[in-house]
Amino acid sequence: YADYDLVIVGSGFFGLTIAERVASELDKRVLVLERRSHLGGNAYSEREPETGIEVHRYGAHLFHTSNARVWEYCNRFTAFTGYQHRVFAKVADQVYAFPMNLALINQFFGRSYSPSEARALIAEQAGEIDTKDAKNLEEKGISLVGRPLYEAFVKGYTAKQWQTDPTQLDASIISRLPVRYTFDNRYFNDTFEGLPVDGYTAWLERMADHPNIEVRTEVDYFDVRDQIPTGTPTVYTGPLDAYFGNSEGALSWRTLDFEQEIVDTPDFQGAPVINYNDEDVPFTRILEFRHFHPERAYSTDKTVIVREFSRFAEPGDEPYYPVNTPDDRAKLLRYRELARKETANANVLFGGRLGTYQYLDMHMAIGSALSMFDNRIAPYFTDGRALA
Ligand code: FDA
């Protein structure tokens, strides 16, 4: 472990962006340690062997950004398809175009409203509760979109996501519930959107493909930490609490369970993602991966679907979404202080979604890694400035 200028813990987008920049821009030797059996973090995907269909192992990953620098950077490693994400929602045996929009409103209320009529209707229904008086998530939801849309599209889905009745959830969990008074049902509003033409793993592998970068999989940093020379510059993208042995208490996360099935049909649902908003359906959504790549010549006799179930993470589960209770936020402040000292005393920087206890989209993880490179790592190696 003495031959490297920089050690990176975790081979997700954050870690690989730092590795790539340091290797190609600064010509320094980088060691990436990854505890899983593959690189790429949660964006990793692989071909399901029976059908050849690319499956995103850790949940659907849709790339989108309005950051021109990030887009240009990503395009060095992959081309993107013209995929535009659209989601549908199944409620009481009807399928609606989501997020809430004019098509959904017309279908749900059974007549054709103009944009201004629909706006007036929802405003009237939402008038039942004033948003500033909302005492819990349910009241907040009703105050934003009215009771009928809340009960059909928000209540059951939220209850399943949080394993908690929305009357028992904090109003602050939702700040807004977007309703569009047009027929536009594109999920993202970003300037750039698409999926990597030959898959996420090919993209991630190209980022790591440099003679100055070595990736070692199935190595847990904590098992080898005492073999790394003290003071070696390190970028840690694993869980923040784990780094400090949970000294301030464990930060809480939600996780997902994925139930994959190969179905003997060319097309199971006609769309990549259908949400199941009714509370009596145990899963939150079904992904059908062939629809992410309509341009590929996948065989048509079988399809791969994945049912997604949401729950609170227990020790040992994959941490996916920070729960972010007031208690978590108090712990996070204490961990940030410990992290600040660790950077100053031991040259360890903390980044990525686990290392900062923050939900980050891929473009945000890449963007924040580029900033860390510019502001901390490049000045350290080129001008001898401190990492802190
Ligand atoms: P990431 O979690 O990818 O990588 C961290 C790595 O560190 C992991 O590989 C882990 O094994 C490793 N590690 C941890 N501890 C270690 C240790 N002690 N030793 C060695 N290795 C260790 N984004 C988006 O833009 N569009 C989308 O549609 C989605 N969809 C989506 C769905 C779900 C379910 C989730 C959870 C997330 C998304 N994302 C997303 C977000 C996306 O996954 C995220 O932006 C990237 O994974 C962030 O990359 P990081 O490198 O920060 O973490």
Image (cartoon, rainbow, N blue to C red):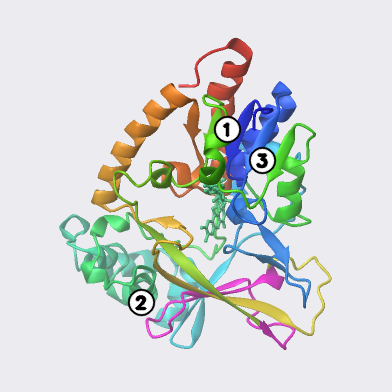
Residue 228: give its label: 1
Instruction: Give the extent of the magenta segment.
Output: 262-291
- The residue depicted at 42 percent of the width and 47 percent of the height is 242
Instruction: Tell me if 47 is positioned left or right of 170 in this view.
Output: right
Q: Position of residue 114 (x, y in %)?
A: 45, 68
Badge 1: residue crowd in 10 Å (few <14, some 14–19, many ≥20): some
Pick out the residue farthest to the top.
383
Q: Quadrant of residue 147?
A: bottom left
Q: Nearer the viewer, mark 1 or mark 3?
A: 1
- Identify the element where label 1 is drawn: loop
Going by the numbered disc 2, the residue's amino acid type is: Gly
Q: Earlier in the sequence, mark 1 or mark 3?
A: 3
Instruction: Tell me if 35 is positioned left or right of 30 in this view.
Output: left
Residue 183 vs 213, above or below: the answer is below
Residue 120 vs 231, above or below: the answer is below
Q: Position of residue 69 (x, y in %)?
A: 64, 33
- The residue depicted at 26 percent of the width and 73 percent of the height is 165
Instruction: Tell me if 173 is positioned left or right of 41 in this view.
Output: left
Q: Quadrant of the C terminus?
A: top left
Going by the numbered disc 1, the residue's amino acid type is: Ile
Residue 156: give its label: 2
Label 2 to label 3: alpha-carbon separation? 36 Å
Label 1 to label 3: alpha-carbon separation? 35 Å
265 in the magenta segment: yes
- Identify the element where label 2 is drawn: helix
Residue under numbered circle 3: 71
Q: Quadrant of the N terminus?
A: top right
Q: Nearer the viewer, residue 379 or 174?
A: 379
168 in the magenta segment: no
